[in-house]
Amino acid sequence: MPEPTKKDETPNGQPEVWSLGEGQAPEDLEKPIDTPPLSTLLIEKPSSATVPVGGDIVFVAKVEAKDLLRKPTIKWFKGKWMDLASKTGKHLQLKETFDRFTKIHTFEMHIIKAKDNYAGNYRCEVSYKDKFDSCSFDLEVKEAEQAQSIDIRSAFKRSSEGQDDAGELDFSGLLKHREVKQQDDAPEVDVWEILKNARPDQYEKIAFMYGITDLRGLLKRMKKMPKEEKKSEAFAKKLEPAYQVDKGGKIRLVVDLADPTVELKWYKNGQEIRPTPKYIFEHKGTQRIMVINNCSMMDDAAYSVAAGDEKCSTELFVKELPIKIVKGIEPVKTTVNERIELECEVSEEGAQVKWMKNGVEVPTGVRSRYRVKSEGTKHFLVIDDASKEDTGTYSVMASGGTSEAHVQVDLKPLKIYQDLQDMTVKLGEPIKLQCEIYPGNVPGRWYRNGQLIQPSDRINIIHRNKIHRLEIATSSLHDAGDYTFVPEGYSQSLCAKIHIIDPPRVHLESLNFPDNTVTIVAGNKLRLEIPISGEPAPRVVWMKGERVILESGHRVRAETHGDQTSLTIEVTEREDSGNYKIVLQNEAGEDTASVKIKVVDIPDAPEAPLVPEVGGDWCSMTWEPPKYDGGSPILGYFVERKKKQSSRWMRLNFDLIKETQFEPKKMIEGVPYEVRIFAVNAIGVSKPSEPSKAFTPLAVTSEPTMLVVDDVTDTTVTVKWRPPETIGAAGLDGYLVEYCIEGTDDWVISNKELTEKTKYTITGLSPGCKILVRVKALNAAGASAPRTLQHSILVKEVVEPPKIRVPRHLKMTYTRRVGEAVNLVVPFMGKPRPKVTWLKDGQAIEPTHVNIRNTDCDSIIFIRKAERSHSGKYEMSVQVENHKDTAIIDIQIVDLPGPPQAVTIEDVWGGNVALVWTPPKDNGNAPITGYTIQKADKKTMEWYTCIEHYHRNCITITELVVGNEYFFRIFSENMCGLSESATQTKKSALIVKEGNSPHDTAQHQYHAQPHSFTLTPTGMQLKTHNFEDHDFKEAPKFTQPLINTFAIAGYNATLNCSVRANPRAKVIWMKNKMTIIDDPRYRMFSNQGVCTLEIRKPSPYDGGMYTCKAINDLGEAQVDCKLEVKGGFTFYELMQRGVPLHLIDKYMNESKTVEQEK
């Protein structure tokens, strides 16, 4: 047996093959894939082609892009699913081009150096969005046969190394890489021989056994290989592959046996054939013959003969002779209800014929109108009851010929004695349609609007002789229409029109609204659909009042469609509320109905609220309900407020207020406010009302404090009080004083106009009566609570011993400079009005020198221009009857002092000059506080100050320039300043260098006498004294102590003292033994030993024990004083100042104690 030819081999000697994968069976390779076209995109499709092995071929597909916005997607497949886009390589290339002028995309698939396994079915798919198109085509690769043999196992093994062509159209490159096993030295096996001798169902097992993986390629090669005829051992000559015989003829089947003794059996379709007159078996030597007589179509079968274990087979084809039509059918013309019979005769009895009408086979079933029968060679088509539809061309077909004829069926002539009449019937009444025709035995059918009417319980169809009647017991709307009676077999028909009328009616019960009232929220769309009835369709009119609602309305329109009418309001408004009337009219009558539409909305905004009463942090407000409640009851109100200057509203209640009044609270006193109202119903919240008039919460002041009786006479009572502790933002307009007689409740207003003073005298009282007095503070918010005296006052003047209250600054010497004014006010007490007298140094005061003016409560001494003669002790006497009180006031008028009496040069040595002087005769009526020493060079006589504020009467001037001659002068100083003139030294002091000539020494002696001189042989020598340096160091000592002081709250106060120390002392101020450090309320000064502590705007909290402490290296000293601050503050003011709570509590308790003691 020759070896199969080899395919193209690789350099390694391995054949290259394409695998089809596992998606397609071998027997399906040649079948095209049917893809129903979804749309048409391809204007040129690739077509099937043939290419020789090793040749190139190009498949082209074109898509028109005129209606496409982007490039379509194209895919090329082999078989059913293999996508060739991943198989491109040197044997397969895909290309795309686009022609801008023709707007055509061209897609090409190039197959280069085709191989035989490239053959198969290919598919091209194009898609764009929802469009899809595809095309299938076949590729046939022709291969030239080769004589050389190939190794079947290597030829049909898949590549495991993934060579150049392995991954192009197969999946060998995707297989798991396996190591190449070493080939053993087993003997070569001829697989071709094994496959040739094996059954087809064993091919797969053999291929797997010998490592053949490309089973499909193997099967294709097996089909193409020439088959060798195996020489039979039983048959010398077998049956022919096929035999043919005419129907009714005879056939001989002959085989020649190699062994005549072998038992032989004949089979037909696998069934053994026994000898019969039809089947005759003959023997002629080694030939065995089976004769089949009178062959029929039943003998058309497969025959086989078995000789021992061998068998040969053949197939017998029986050829049937054509049936000819001997006598054809004839044309027929008849009328309806007649019998039609068509007849033909064929050449052979028992032949099969086919009857046709107008080219369509005539149905001959059990329920068919047509009957077919045959008698010998004659065949008949019978129509028992002909109708108009039976008209046509009838034909009969046999295997050897055809015959046809025309059949015409006409209607019988019809006479109408009584035609159908049009009727108008009310709904529910009976309907009777009747006609009379001839001939009377003709049946007919009734139709309504083209639909056949069948009899039922409601419909009765009657046919009596010539009369045909249709009766409907109770008419309905569906019974209206065109009625037709059609006699069977006639072209004529009788027609009538039935018109059903029904009075119109509005079916409001379908709305399911109580009282036919529809409620809707304003702003929503309303579509009210109401069923209506009536035949003919009634004319519908919607009305609101006298206004008709049209179908063409924009916002409100009425529409009617079929059996319902509708009212549509696109955006409902409150004006749409009301009764709507529906009027229906048709020829049967009229009907009306009413529907109430209630449009509910948010309520109108209420009117601006009123604020009748205002408090310190509250107000009372009232308002009226809104004029329109929105069609729904008002559920409550929301209240908002804001500051007048602000734009932010704040809601005051989160639960609805049912009443029309409210009291907002927690407002800031003195700030203008506005309030507004929102009304709420079930639909929502209204718009806000207009803001109320601006109002300012104001509180009345607290009651006046410390109301006491200041004076009582026989007809008047004078009271005084302190302002209220709390005044508030409304301020204080004044006070109202009222009194009533003890035992009555009739309070009388004493002052018709408000008084701003805190003291008032009630006049016009009856002597000896007892009265009660109360005082009210008034402001814009009203009158405060009254402050009432706890006890009644007896209107009777009382003698009060006089008492002089000397002011604190007059208890010490009152000092003024010459020329200044003196104005002293000395208050006193006493009743009745005391007598005041003044004495100076025991003598009466001359009115020309001093002016004195007395009042009921004080005495004023006034000196317009003070002189030193006004100094002295002034004695003031105040006397009431036998009671007397005196006070002495020391007035000191001071002036500038005179110069010192004499200034002498006591000594001169080196660069030093010792000066001595005596105090001035006139000290200016004030102690001398110091001296100012000046020097002047004799050449220039320009004076320079050497030292100021010097306290002693002698001094040594140092650091004088040698060679200069100096004069000196001294000014005296008191509290008024320096003396107007100075006392100058009469002699000058010459500063000479030590060791000069005697002449110079004598000249020096002339000017200044040294303390002692010694005469020596060489001349005179100055003996200098040895002076010891004086120790000026001194421990701190206060020369002026602190004095207990009273301060007025809110006005700055100072504490002063003076200290002497050397070296300079460090000064520390303390309050209540606590050092004052970095407190902005205190300022500390120290100048020339004078120490000052300034307390800025003190409060009662600042009162206490103050200490000034001076410290240096030699010791320390301290002085104390007590500061009392009068004029208290309220609790709120102390809190604003940052005073601790425990100190505020202590202060408030002390204030109450002091008030009770007073």
Image (tube, rainbow, N blue to C red):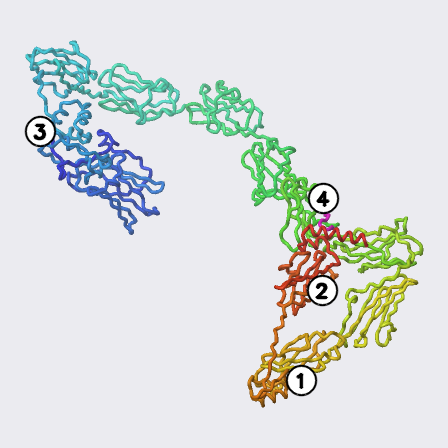
Kind of residue at disc 4: Thr
Sequence-wise, which precedes: disc 1 or disc 4? 4
Between circles 3 and 2, the one closer to the viewer is: 2
Q: Residue at x 66, y 54 (%)?
A: 1138
Stretch of the chain drawn in magenta: 614-625
Sequence-wise, which precedes: disc 1 or disc 2? 1
CA separation in Å, label 4 and label 3: 121 Å
Sequence-wise, which precedes: disc 4 or disc 3? 3
- From the viewer's side, name the closer residue of 317 and 454: 317
Residue 702 located left or right of residue 237? right
Quick check: 1007 above or below 867? below
- Relative image position of residue 46 (x, y in whole percent): 24, 40
- From the viewer's side, name the closer residue of 723 and 1061: 1061
Residue 1123 part of the magenta segment:
no
What is the quadrant of residue 1035 in the picture?
A: bottom right
Q: Secondary structure at mark 3?
A: loop
Residue ID for mark 1? 985
Q: Which mark is residue 660?
A: 4
Q: Which mark is residue 2?
A: 3
What is the quadrant of residue 473 in the picture?
A: top right
Residue most extreme to the front: 1017
- Relative image position of residue 161 (x, y in whole percent): 19, 37
- Relative image position of residue 336 (x, y in whole percent): 39, 22
Quick check: 529 above or below 472? below
Residue 1068 located left or right of residue 861? left
